[in-house]
Image (tube, coloured by chain):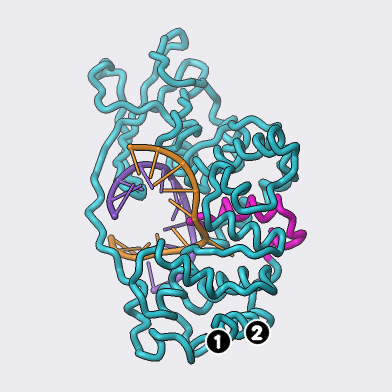
Chain colours: A cyan, B purple, C orange
Amino acid sequence: MSKTFSAKLLKWFDKHGRKDLPWQHPRSAYFVWLSEIMLQQTQVVTVIPYFQRFIERFPDVNSLAQASEDEVLRYWAGLGYYSRARNLHKAAQKIMLEFQGEFPRDLAGWQSLPGVGRSTAGAIIAQAFGEFGVILDGNVKRVLRRFYATHEADEQLWPLATKLTPQKSIIDYSQAIMDLGAMVCTRSKPKCMLCPLNQECSAYQTETVQNYPAKKQRKALPEKEKYFLLMINEKNEILLERQPSPGIWGGLWSLPSVDDLQQFPQQALEKLPSFTHTFTHFKLTLKPVKIRVSTSLQISETLPQAWILLKDLSKYALPTPIKVFLCANDL
DNA sequence: AATCCGGGGAC
DNA sequence: GTCCCAGGATT
């Protein structure tokens, strides 16, 4: 049934597949796991430099487990979805303490680790151990929806993905199905003429490729606005606060933010140009305010705080828009 | 089943 | 500007 599908895909992979990604050499369980987490909702080209820096500092699961969460987040800062980094760190500690430093070998073992779901576990089983594992990521979903010309929900695609996955050549197949989605069966302008599966592809044969996957209707993003306090003391230090997790920018260091400025004397404030940042579920207008304060001023401490010099900014994990703002402003 | 969680690349 | 990317956790 799936024989022609995987056979044709593997033949295509031999010639056109990606075989020199950083996590493929060596293809260790640690590298595969780390790459799969970084690649969740994040494109390959974005991940590569983060992966390189990360493995240089944390070359194995033990070094990752021993590190502080704060340092792990520093190496993740800018990549987004910071719960991935927190979960990765927790998982490393679990592997060291509960699994005696040995990676799981089966699906259930991997899925017991925080941040590892069904698809990531399947990818790791396949790529790290060469055993039967099924992937259903964004690429595979798109390929399957077009191949079967179906609008079925994500969950309904698992049996199809499982049926198509071969017992042999699993390492290459799992890479091949993702490469096809990333390189040929792309979201826009798919290269159907180059596709090894076009003769069996229902969407291609009915000339309805553009209908799959269907466009989702998006709701208008809610808009929020907050004041971000650029507090500067007499030593020219600024105040950072560590954000609570879970939550936006959880675990990262950001400027203190407030909904209004009524607690501050008007003459102490200097309003700076506002800017916007769009998250997945809302649009935030950041309204920076510069406040000169005396060193002795006691700020209410609901979150961990640090007075830091601008030159030491790189020692902290900052959200990208905050980092960009601070680097663009002399104090 | 929806919603939350970032940032950026491609268009 | 829109869309969505090697998704998972939470509700």
First in sequence, mark 1 or 2: give its number: 2
Horizontal and vertical percent position of residue A295:
47, 11
Q: Against A10, is A220 above or below? A: above
Q: Is residue A151 magenta?
A: no
Q: Quadrant of residue A259?
A: top left
Confirm or deny contact between disc 1 and disc 2 (CB under 8 A): yes
Residue type beneath disc 1 = Pro
Identify the chain of the residue marked 1, using the numbered disc in the image.
A
- State the residue position of label 2: A11
* Disc 1 to disc 2, C-alpha distance: 8 Å
Q: Secondary structure at mark 2?
A: helix
Badge 2 sits on which subunit? A
Q: Residue at horizontal 72%, vertical 59%?
A: A129
- Nearer to us in this view, A264 or A197: A197
Q: Nearer the viewer, residue A102 or A274?
A: A102
Which residue is at the front of the view, A251 or A255?
A251
Q: Is residue A122 left or right of residue A330?
A: right
Magenta extent: A21-42
SS label for mark 1: loop
